[in-house]
Image: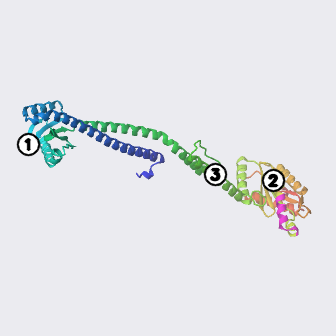
Amino acid sequence: MKFSNFSIRTKLIVLLGATSAMALLISAVMSLSLTFVTQRNESMRHLQQISDIARENLTAALAFRDGASAARMLGSLSTNPRILAAIIHDDEAQQFSAYVAPKANQKALALQLAEVSQLAKQQHQQLFEQRLGLESIEFDYMYAVSPIVFEGKTLGTLTLLSDNQALKERVSYFVVMQVLISLLTLFIIVLISIRQQKIFTAPIFHIIDVMRNIAQTKNYTVSVETIQNDEFKVLYRHFNDMIAEIRERDALLSRLATTDPLTVLANRRHAMEVLQTLVTRALRKQEFFGLIMFDIDYFKRINDQFGHPVGDVVLKEVAAILMHAAREYDLVARMGGEEFLVMCDHSDVETTHLIAERMRLAIEAKVITLDTGKTLRITASAGVYAVVPVSDDLDAPLRCVDAALYHAKESGRNQVSMWENHEK
């Protein structure tokens, strides 16, 4: 599985763990290097101290060629379990006296001594003329070659070989402790990161949940809040601004899709959707519903005489009157031109007729003042249809209410005509 496919929570934990592990590794390597150098120098200094003491004691024995005393002094080095060998060479590079630890690997020791002896011969001038010692630490052993000087003359050299066991033990102990400390530290960091990652991921998952909810419910009234004062607060603010813009856009689109732009009433399409719901509910409950169709009398004459701007004013005034006179749960729609439809839920014949008559009288009483100062009175005819539906078909009630309206106009206009009366 690719790392890019992991969740943000997992990526944060892995990233923090990997970064911490790298930092701990670098720290461990640096600490190990420093410890190794320190312990190596300490081991070499200790070997050099032993060499200096032994060299002071052996100077007289070499000067007087007292091999027994030299052997006895070298033998005292057996108290130090780290010393593998101690050899005295005279000024002609001949072995004068030697001590070899019984536990030493004789074959390996012979090779080591041969290497040191060869190096001492190559550095003869440094040892005998410059009177500078040689020292070094190899993988399995360390050595120190020091000149033995008596009364200004170099009599020979003292070679000490020691194993590196103490150095290896110290370094190994440090490595083990460093690994344990690093693992414990990494474990603590991972535990902390698992808890602390919520600070970073919780706001993101919150927004994701909100977005998922919006996608499922299409509810854009939600908003997200945070108490954090970091970049997430900025993200939340921009997210809320975006949701607000979408909400405003959807509201505008909804108004454009369902509202007549001139009168701000429901348009024909929205009216048909609501009418279908009204008829279906009335059919299910076996209740009355009522329809009122209004038509402004002589509207074409108004347009021809005063112009379309005045006609638009008349349409908006009639729309306002109908909205004011309708009940709170009735819907008023402009069906097109000068026709208006009022849908009355749970309204029988008498109630629907009263609503229509109230609206007609309000239109008749309205005096419209034009920009020119002139006044204009208008009337409207209405057809009323109220019935308990026997099907959810919309064509029948629309035909009936339209027929009632036609009868009102044919009967002299400015009146309300019931569909039942018209059928009679």
Which residue occupies the extreme right position in the image? 374
Compare residues 142 and 46 and report the one nearer the observer: 46
User: What is the secondary structure assignment of the residue under circle 1?
Assistant: loop
The residue at the point 82 percent across, 59 percent down is 316
- Can you see residue 101? no
Please tell me how crowded label 3 is: few (under 14), some (14-19), or many (20+) other residues with Cα within 10 Å. few
- Of badges 1 and 3, the one in the foreground is 1
- Can you see residue 154? yes
Compare residues 166 and 130 and report the one nearer the observer: 130
User: What is the secondary structure assignment of the residue under circle 2?
Assistant: helix
**Who comes first in sequence, dot 1 or dot 3?**
1
Would you name the residue on which mark 3 appears? 241
Answer whether residue 312 is magenta in the image: yes
Residue contact at pointers 2 and 1, CB within 8 angstroms: no
**Who comes first in sequence, dot 2 or dot 1?**
1
Please tell me how crowded label 1 is: few (under 14), some (14-19), or many (20+) other residues with Cα within 10 Å. few
Please tell me how crowded label 2 is: few (under 14), some (14-19), or many (20+) other residues with Cα within 10 Å. some
Q: What is the three-letter code of the residue carrying label 1?
A: Gln
Would you name the residue on which mark 2 appears? 323
Q: CA distance from mark 3 to mark 2?
A: 34 Å
Q: CA distance from mark 1 to mark 3?
A: 95 Å
**Who comes first in sequence, dot 3 or dot 2?**
3
Work out which quarter of the rendered image holds the C terminus and state it.
bottom right
What range of the chain is rendered magenta? 305-317
Q: What is the three-letter code of the residue carrying label 2?
A: Met
- Quadrant of the rendered image containing residue 314: bottom right
Q: Is the residue 20 above or below the residue 256 in the image?
A: above
